[in-house]
Amino acid sequence: MTPSLPASSAPSITARLEGVRSRIADACRVAGRDPASVTLTAVSKTQPPAAIDAILAAGQQVFGENRVQEAQGRWTARRPGLPGLELRLIGPLQTNKAAEALALFDVIETLDREKLARALATAAEASGMTPRVLVQVNTGAEPQKAGVPVDGVEGLIARARDLGLIVEGLMCIPPVEADPGPHFDLLAELARRNGLAVLSMGMSGDFEAAVARGATHVRVGSALFGERIGL
Ligand SMILES: *Cc1c(COP(=O)(O)O)cnc(C)c1O
């Protein structure tokens, strides 16, 4: 049997999008923030074309993807018809995919080492593009997780700037079992100290807490599309 979405999937994605947007607006009101200061990044990894069509029709224009190749398959053909589209890479990037990532993504949120900064700079030189990046911080000091250690943040920002990258802000993924609040506070403090405006933090389970702590970009997948099948 071919898996297919139920006929009701389009209206339900629209309703979910409205629900998430209004929860962000409520969290902004509670925090005394302008709702326009928070961008909803819809995490579209693994989603089938019908779900993408539905959320585009509902007006969503900013998307996050974890994998370069998967994102190419989903977005390369759609992109020319979508002038307002913004694509953000939120998964780990290998240096040998730097050029492809730069060609597809508007912002790379997962810069976490000098070697990758150098690869992006080289790709930028070849293509004439200027990479916009966030530095991913391993706020929980988890050995298996991507992200620069907290004590390496300042150095990596400086190095990336030397190489001509535009460092717009910071991104983090708190440890799964932890209270995310202190991790969001730490990321916000690191951004303040380094004069950075963009804070990508908060996912389906904790985006309101992230908004309360200054998130400018929340990355929401399952709350918009339903539970994912696979990674
Ligand atoms: C998958 C993913 C998300 C979205 O997760 P949900 O819990 O489905 O909202 C956000 N950020 C990153 C880095 C992800 O890989």
Image (cartoon, rainbow, N blue to C red):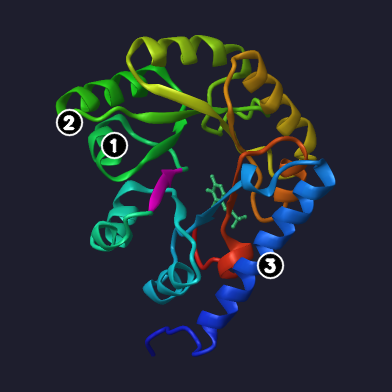
In the image, residue 166 lies at what x, y percent?
40, 23
In the image, residue 144 lies at what x, y percent?
56, 33
| Left or right: 54 as drawn, with respect to 177 | left
Q: Nearer the viewer, residue 182 or 107?
A: 107
Residue appearing at x 48%, y 65% in the figure: 59
The crowd level at tag 1 (other Cα within 10 Å; few <14, some 14-19, many 20+) is many
> Sequence-wise, which precedes: disc 1 or disc 2?
1
**Circle 2: element type:** helix
Q: Nearer the viewer, residue 15 or 33?
A: 33
Amino acid, disc 3: Gly
Amino acid, disc 1: Leu
Mark 1, ligand 1, within 8 Å: the answer is no
> Sequence-wise, which precedes: disc 2 or disc 3?
3
User: Mark 1 and 2 residues: CB-CB less than 8 Å, in contact?
Assistant: yes
- The residue at which mark 3 appears reads as 19
- The residue at which mark 1 appears reads as 102
Q: Which label sits on residue 127? A: 2
Q: How far, Cα to Cα, is label 2 from label 3?
A: 40 Å
Magenta part of the chain: 85-89
